[in-house]
Image: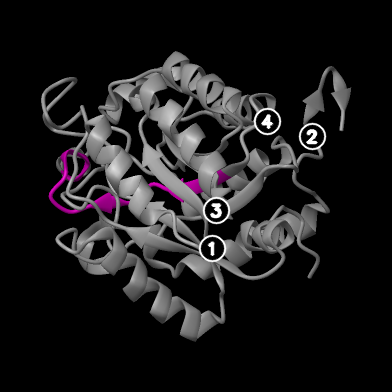
């Protein structure tokens, strides 16, 4: 079956000339939506792991985490190049001296990129200055993973995100000004979200030249604010068939230059009260690809750029 969207792993191979894998790193950090600066409960879907569940203990040094994950992934997949992936919470939300120490420790010979997951309101010029110098010194790529989640402000409030669309746009402009890459995270699934929101999100990412995107289905982690809302019947999730249709709709308005890292999120069943309608993630991925095939649709085939249909 012909791939009708831009697959992330293939874009990495094309860019670096061979298989390239992410090595997850977990730090003992936090974010302004948890420590009281913006809020104390965190985002409604965020658990104690801060968005990561496959990582090693944060008590291990960055060097040790890289070594262990590199050893496992290299032997299993034959990879020789890696991206150090700082995954949990907001990795630019720490004192600059500590940030400099950690990022420098991760910039090793076989590390071709540093990927930092963070919030749109945690991107500041001093950290960017350091990353720009580090990138030049070690000839290493810098990638930011920004959690936008939705272009619907009411949904952002329901998620207790503590930021708006303007914060996201400001961060994208700051990051792009430095020549860094951006992967944007989006959640598709709440019933309140309209199809117009899906289209608008795809256009926003396209016109801002986001480099990559991660699409998450809406799952409900245990011991979160979202679980309480779900149990009280205050959160409705669209059916699986509608999710598949919406992802296809999103892709059709997304610039084909944007690599798709993920079509559906995943989380261990024991950590959630709802996840992927009880299906394996790859089954949902296959359904999305089958619908693209059925419609003879491709990523970006409905996108207008500068008033012209691509």
User: Which tag is nearer the camera, tag 2 or tag 3?
Assistant: 2
Per the rendering, the mark at residue 302 is 2
Residue 247 colored in magenta in the image: no
Give the Cα separation between the discs numbered 4 and 1. 24 Å
State if disc 3 and disc 4 touch (CB < 8 Å): no
> Toward the viewer: 111 or 119?
111
User: Quick one: SS at disc 2?
Assistant: loop
Q: Position of residue 57 (x, y in %)?
A: 19, 64
Q: Is residue 3 visible?
A: yes
For marks 2 and 3 on the same chain, the one whose residue lies earlier in the sequence = 3
Residue 26: % across, % down:
26, 56
Name the residue carrying label 3: 241
Question: What segment is highlighted magenta in the picture?
Answer: 213-227
Q: Earlier in the sequence, mark 1 or mark 3?
A: 3
Element on which disc 3 rests: helix
Q: Which residue is mark 1?
A: 284
Q: Residue at x 75, y 43 (%)?
A: 256
Question: What residue appears at the point 46 percent right and 18 percent down from the top-left corner?
Answer: 165
């Amino acid at each position: 079956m012909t791939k009708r969207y831009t697959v992330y792993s293939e874009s990495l191979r094309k860019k670096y000339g061979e298989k390239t894998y992410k090595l997850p790193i977990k730090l003992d950090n936090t974010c302004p939506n948890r420590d009281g600066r913006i809020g104390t409960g965190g985002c409604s879907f965020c658990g104690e792991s801060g968005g990561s569940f496959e990582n090693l203990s944060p008590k291990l040094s960055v060097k040790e985490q890289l070594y262990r994950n590199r050893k496992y992934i290299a032997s299993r997949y034959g990879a020789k190049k890696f991206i150090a992936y700082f995954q949990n919470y907001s990795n630019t939300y720490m004192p600059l001296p500590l940030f400099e120490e950690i990022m420098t420790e991760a910039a090793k010979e076989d590390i071709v990129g540093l990927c930092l997951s963070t919030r749109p309101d945690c991107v500041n010029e001093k950290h960017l200055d350091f990353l720009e110098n580090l990138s030049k010194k070690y000839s290493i790529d810098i990638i930011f993973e920004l959690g936008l989640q939705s272009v619907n402000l009411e949904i952002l409030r329901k998620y207790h995100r503590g930021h708006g669309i303007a914060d996201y746009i400001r961060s994208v402009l700051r990051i792009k000004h430095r020549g860094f890459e951006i992967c944007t995270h989006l959640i598709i699934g709440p019933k309140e979200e309209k199809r117009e929101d899906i289209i608008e999100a795809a256009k926003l990412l396209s016109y801002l030249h986001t480099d990559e995107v991660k699409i998450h289905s809406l799952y409900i982690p245990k011991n979160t604010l979202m679980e309480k809302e779900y149990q009280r019947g205050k959160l409705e999730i669209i059916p699986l068939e509608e999710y598949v249709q919406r992802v296809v709709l999103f892709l059709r308005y997304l610039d084909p230059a944007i690599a798709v890292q993920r079509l559906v999120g995943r989380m261990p069943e024991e950590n959630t009260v709802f996840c992927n309608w009880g299906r394996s993630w790859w089954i949902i991925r296959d359904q999305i690809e089958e619908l693209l095939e059925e419609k003879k649709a491709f990523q970006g085939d409905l996108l207008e750029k500068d008033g012209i249909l691509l």
